[in-house]
Image (cartoon, grey):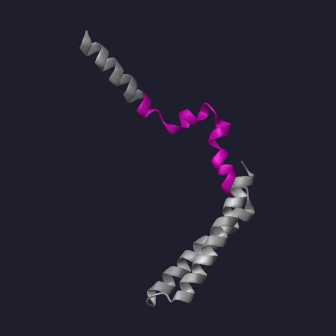
Amino acid sequence: MNGRIVSAVCAAALLAALMPAGVMAAKNPARARQGAKAGKQNPELKQLKAEKKALRSQVQAAKANGKLSKEDRARFKAERDRLRSEMNALTQTGR
């Protein structure tokens, strides 16, 4: 009797774990697309993400030439902070 109960509980847990995310998202499709809308429909946010990616590549290129100077480090930090604050301002207004 106890073996059947344990196997039933394990089977239920296994089925819940194997349920595809698409099936779970189909229950509430508006919520599933909520995150996708924020990043894809805002062209300004998309531009900021591209700038952030370009900044990372600039930092990597500068590090490849040797150590970063204090001025370069401060400039990269200021640019990164500016991008971060602008991105946060855009995402916070959507909530």
Question: Is any part of residue 72 visible from this angle?
Answer: yes
On screen, residue 55 above or below 70: above
* Magenta highlight on residue 19: yes
* Magenta highlight on residue 14: no
Q: Nearer the viewer, residue 91 or 75?
A: 75
Q: In the displayed structure, does residue 55 sit left or right of residue 91? A: left
Q: In the displayed structure, does residue 73 sit left or right of residue 28? A: left
Residue 19 location (% of width, % of height): 46, 32
Q: Nearer the viewer, residue 13 or 69?
A: 69
Q: Tell me what residue is drawn at x 60 percent, y 73 percent.
A: 80
Residue 13 location (% of width, % of height): 39, 27
Residue 52 location (% of width, % of height): 61, 71
Question: Is any part of residue 46 visible from this angle?
Answer: no
Task: Specify the segment rendered in magenta.
Answer: 16-40
What is the magenta segment's predominant secondary structure?
helix
Q: Tell me what residue is drawn at x 58 percent, y 71 percent.
A: 53
Q: Nearer the viewer, residue 56 or 67?
A: 67
On screen, residue 81 above or below 38: below
Q: In the displayed structure, does residue 20 sit left or right of residue 36? A: left
* Quarter of the rendering containing residue 71: bottom right
* Quarter of the rendering containing residue 31: top right
Q: In the displayed structure, does residue 46 sit left or right of residue 59? A: right
Q: Tell me what residue is drawn at x 39 percent, y 23 percent.
A: 12
